[in-house]
Image (cartoon, rainbow, N blue to C red):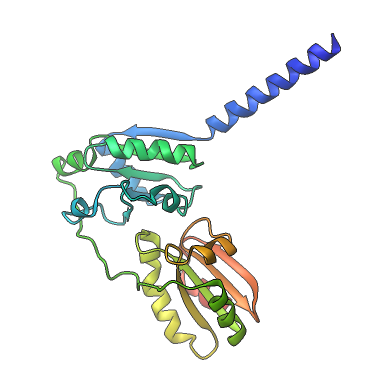
């Protein structure tokens, strides 16, 4: 009898754990009005999963651009911050719904899918912008060996782990440009495109972009994920 009770308790705990895990994942389809309100709140990540040709016609301001047909889509998706709400859209809502399911499977906590996609957004006469391909300097691939050589040759290194398609990375680009000029006498700033440098991203456990890591005499002394002010970065240097 005691064994049966113990087994029943174990099963109950297992079910509770599974239920809790699914309860932590929120995937919801929302109207264009609700989606716009979420975007205006500006506390999450906007994700456009359309093709480059579609995006070229205009996209929602501040969107990260990640083509769902890209063979690396899921790997790149996992470079986004999973603890922030994601507002995802496509042309009419089908592909973004599929992307939302993929995000749920990969541990994103909160995903909102725009029902009707850009079609609904455009019918509501809401604003769009053209892609800006100059916001992030294209960083070449860097090997782990070359990166460690840079750490040996510089006492202070700030590594900026980024991607070209990430909107928060684009937001940080002008700040990094300014900082690079101002601290050139005391620190080296290295831009690392994690898509072009997967070995480096794996070695330093980069699980979201942008990520900033400060190295002093080759040792990691500080790390920050996400957008950060110029003043806060400068203070660390």
Residue 143, above or below 31? below
Q: Is residue 110 above or below residue 193?
A: above
Q: Is 77 placed left or right of 122 in the picture?
A: right
Q: Position of residue 86 (x, y in %)?
A: 40, 45
Q: In percent of the image, x 58 and y 66: which residue is there?
A: 223
Q: Is residue 130 above or below residue 100?
A: below
Q: Residue 231 at what x, y percent from top left?
A: 49, 74
Residue 66 coordinates in the image, percent (x, y):
33, 52
The total number of labels drawn is 0
Q: Which is nearer the eye, 23 or 126?
A: 23
Residue extending furthest right? 2
Q: Residue furthest bottom?
A: 185
Please tell me whether residue 99 is drawn above or below residue 177 in the rendered image: above
- Residue 45, given in percent of the width and then of the height, sits at 39, 51
Q: Residue at x 36, y 44 (%)?
A: 87
Q: Is residue 219 left or right of residue 114?
A: right
Q: Residue at x 59, y 87 (%)?
A: 153
Q: Which image quarter is the N terminus in?
A: top right
Q: Quadrant of residue 131?
A: bottom left
Q: Residue at x 23, y 55 (%)?
A: 52
Quadrant assignment for the C terminus? bottom right
């Amino acid at each position: 009898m005691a064994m049966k009770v113990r087994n029943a308790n174990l099963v109950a705990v297992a079910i509770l754990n599974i239920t809790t895990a699914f309860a932590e994942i929120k995937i919801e389809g929302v109207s264009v009005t609700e989606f716009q309100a979420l975007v205006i709140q500006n506390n999450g990540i906007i994700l456009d999963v359309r093709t480059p040709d579609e995006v070229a016609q205009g996209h929602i301001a501040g969107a990260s651009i990640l083509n769902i047909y890209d063979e690396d889509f899921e790997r790149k998706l996992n470079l986004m911050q999973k603890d922030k709400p994601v507002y995802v859209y496509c042309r009419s809502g089908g592909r973004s719904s599929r992307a939302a399911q993929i995000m749920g499977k990969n541990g994103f906590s909160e995903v909102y899918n725009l029902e009707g996609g850009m079609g609904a957004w455009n019918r509501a006469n809401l604003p769009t912008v053209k892609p800006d391909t100059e916001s992030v300097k294209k960083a070449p691939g860097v090997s782990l060996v070359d990166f460690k050589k840079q750490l040996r040759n510089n006492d202070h290194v700030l590594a900026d782990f980024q991607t070209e398609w990430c909107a928060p990375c684009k937001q940080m680009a002008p700040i990094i440009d300014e900082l690079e000029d101002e601290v050139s006498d005391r620190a080296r700033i290295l831009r690392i495109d994690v898509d072009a440098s997967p070995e480096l991203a794996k070695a330093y456990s980069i699980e979201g972009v942008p990520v900033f890591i400060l190295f002093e005499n080759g040792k990691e002394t500080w790390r920050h994920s996400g957008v950060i002010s110029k003043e806060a970065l400068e203070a660390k240097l």
